[in-house]
Amino acid sequence: MELGLSWVVFVGIFGVFVALKWMLCSVNQWFYEIKLGDKRLSLPPGDLGWPLIGNMWSFLRAFKSSNPDSFISTFVTRFGHTGMYKTFMFGSPSIIITVPEACRRVLTDDEAFKPGWPTSTLKLIGRKSFIGISYDEHKRLRRLTAAPVNGHEALSMYLRYIEDNVVSALDKWAGMGEIEFLTELRKLTFRIIMYIFLSSESEQAMEALEREYTALNYGVRAMAINIPGFAYHKALKARKKLVATFQSIVDERRERRRKNPTTPKKDMMDALLDVEDENGRRLNDEEIIDVLVMYLNAGHESSGHITMWATLFLEKHPEFFQRAKAEQEAIVKNRPPTQKGLALKEVRDMEYLSKVIDETLRLVTFSFVVFREAKADVNISGYTIPKGWKVLVWFRSVHLDPEIYPEPKEFNPLRWDGLTPKAGTYLPFGAGSRTCPGNDLAKLEIAVFLHYFLLNYKLERLNPACPLMYLPHSRPKDNCLGRIRRVSSS
Ligand code: HEM
């Protein structure tokens, strides 16, 4: 009798629990979908998750596990291979897009979509950075800043600086014993971007700034919880310090230019101070600082990580390592004896190495997602993306789709033999008006590094089986602890 009663109580409690869960999981749906009227019927399939946090918990759980792709697989398993899923993430109702044609459409249709980064990210990167300003302002500032980092003339100018720094960094690391390879690479790429923007080389100032950027990045994909101890809180503090440092640099530069108006202009900071719009308006300090915060961040984290991954993949596959090394040896052998160092043309002719870099960019997909917002209701493949909803363009799924790239998790530079990717299937640098303006600079940095590394060095990792982390970006948990060993004196 007593047993029967406790069974009824158990079933009752279970029933209440299931009903409560169903109600809670429907709150977001009621709140965000009811107001769409009939349009809600053409939303892509999906699930808006729990109130307030939506699907953030499953996202973070997947990306903090050893299988980040389980996040998207869950949608595919539950709702089919539709390539578009409704969700609720980073505080907004959103549509995740995982197929090439739809990704391309979102990235290239500026009439229908604008940047849609979460407010928490905007607070970290700056409301006057490229992700916060108007369409016209973005166009103007992009025109001003893209050519000086990416054009042929610019790259020829930076090549020697990059090369000198790569050579001396490798030489220094070989004498340092154990190093965190990734941390050192980030310092190297940071030094390069600081030089381009601020002509600054003070070692101490750079190390301090780079540390702040590390904290800033941890906050970008974390939950926006501004409480001491949480990544987002630390990131906000880091931003404050970065802004204060850049403010003093701007003040000092303005002062120097006031005292010596005829000093030749040399770096991006000078260009930003000089630029005027059609009404003669110049950028104010906040605008300059936010552009700096954004560029210096985007301009070193990504190149540092991809350089590390390319090195690791080559070390893991001796046959690819040997082939890449042979190409570099041939370049040195065929060069006129009077030539000192690399020429830009030699870098452009590194056919095999460029496949290694393309494959690394695909397999790692440093920016696994980018954010847009629908400016009006948009129809893609029969599904509605409602006005005001965010669009999460999930590059990682495109690059790891076995239909597009067979055995997608294998590192295989040979897959690029004769392959010209179809539109939307290869997006390491994005597409459309917001394509990465530093793509050629990044590839140049990576190629120059690999040239010298392959010719003269090996990496011996301390924990080759070290587990990976996927947030904010894919990397070994130990930041690739190891030794750089010199293998020849050429
Ligand atoms: C391997 C290295 C790199 C990767 C994988 C990468 C990836 C990307 C991607 C995917 C975007 C598009 C974001 C979007 O569509 O919303 C982007 C934008 C951007 N990248 Fe890169 N990037 C790299 C290197 C660099 C470098 C070296 C710089 C600086 C010179 C840079 C500066 C920027 C800036 C400023 C934007 C924003 C562009 C805009 O909104 O108009 N990136 N990057």
Image: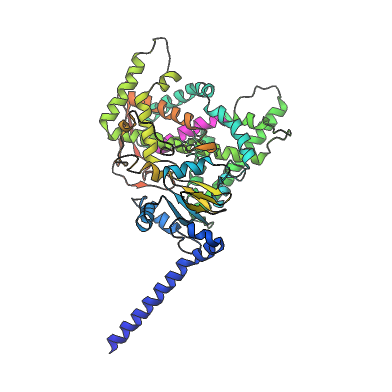
User: Residue placed farthest to the left in the image?
Assistant: 319
The foreground one among 180 and 435 is: 435
Number of marks in the image? 0
For the N terminus, give its image quadrant: bottom left
The residue shown at (45%, 51%) is 96
Measuring from the top left, give residue 101's x and y in whole percent: 44, 42
Measuring from the top left, give residue 469's x and y in whole percent: 38, 47
Measuring from the top left, give residue 264's x and y in whole percent: 65, 22
The residue shown at (45%, 38%) is 302
Measuring from the top left, give residue 127's x and y in whole percent: 61, 46
Decide whether residue 400 is among the magenta residues. Answer: no
The foreground one among 281 and 97 is: 97
In this view of the protein, can residue 38 be seen by the observer?
Answer: yes
Q: Is residue 119 above or below residue 317?
A: below
Secondary structure predominantly adopted by residues drawn in magenta: helix
The residue shown at (72%, 29%) is 258
For the record, the magenta segment spans 181-197
- Report whether 101 appears left or right of 124: left
In this view of the protein, can residue 175 be seen by the observer?
Answer: no
Decide whether residue 185 is among the magenta residues. Answer: yes
The residue shown at (64%, 38%) is 137
The foreground one among 276 and 74 is: 74
User: Residue placed farthest to the right in the image?
Assistant: 279
For the C terminus, give its image quadrant: top left
Residue 341, located in which quarter of the rendered image? Answer: top left
